[in-house]
Image (cartoon, grey):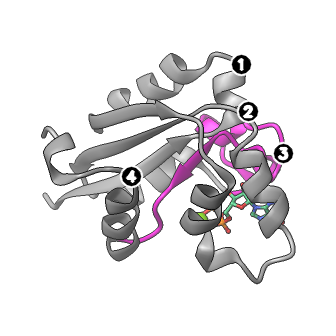
Amino acid sequence: MTIQRTLSIIKPDATRRNLTGKINARFEENGLRIIAQKRIHMSLKQAEGFYAVHSERAFFSDLCEFMCSGPVVVQVLEGDNAVATNRTIMGATNPANADEGTIRKDFGESIEANSVHGSDSTENAATEIGFFFSQTELVG
Ligand code: IDP
Ligand code: MG
């Protein structure tokens, strides 16, 4: 057992379709515990800061605009191997390539509007969790 924490975001395409509960059920059914959660409307500055690693990518400005197009739910998931476990639950970036039964396969609309974000390493998870949450907001 390696208990980890990872940052998850339920993206605007999913909150718009009222899918927060259905997506959260996927995490809980797969052994991840939501130990912090808040619904926010990101500013463009926040989105640009969060996705700074992608600032050179062609899709960067569209992505940041999309992430500000409606409310998101930012959350911290905890569980065994949480970073990789969540990536498996989420599925591939492009819903068209995602495995059956994954969140992105079942709910994603497009490669951009793919319903969820999940950290891709424990190092990035720590940075991303710190971007949205203080230590006292994490209740394990
Ligand atoms: P990930 O979310 O699966 O880790 P990343 O490559 O880190 O994928 O990309 C971050 C986000 O940028 C994706 O979740 C998606 O919303 C968006 N994105 C990635 N590739 C493309 C693309 O080719 N066109 C438009 N948006 C993209
Ligand atoms: Mg990524």
Closer to the observer: label 4 or label 3?
4
Say which residue label 2 marks: 13
Three-letter amino acid code at disc 4? Phe
Quarter of the image for the C terminus: give it.
Answer: top left
Residue at image position (30%, 67%) is 126
Three-letter amino acid code at disc 1? Arg
Three-letter amino acid code at disc 2? Asp
**Earlier along the polypeptide chain: callout 4 or callout 1?**
1
User: How far apart, in angstroms, are the residues tagged by discs 1 and 2?
Assistant: 7 Å
Location of ligand 2 given as a quarter of the image: bottom right
Residue 17 is marked as 1
Q: For the magenta stretch, what is the residue range?
A: 93-121
Is 15 inside the magenta-drawn segment? no
Corner quadrant of residue 42:
top right
Residue at image position (72%, 44%) is 114
Callouts 1 and 2 close, C-beta under 8 Å: yes
**Residue 110 in picture, x, y percent from top left:** 84, 45
Considering the numbered disc 3 on the image, is that residue within a helix, a strand or a loop? Answer: loop
Left or right side of 78 for 18 = right
User: How far apart, in angstroms, are the residues tagged by discs 2 and 3?
Assistant: 10 Å
Residue at image position (53%, 22%) is 20
Quarter of the image for the N terminus: give it.
Answer: bottom left
Tell whether circle 3 marks a residue whose Cβ is less than 8 angstroms from ligand 1.
yes
**Earlier along the polypeptide chain: callout 2 or callout 3?**
2
User: How far apart, in angstroms, are the residues tagged by discs 4 and 2?
Assistant: 20 Å
Say which residue label 4 marks: 132
Residue 110 is marked as 3
**Residue 109 in picture, x, y percent from top left:** 81, 37
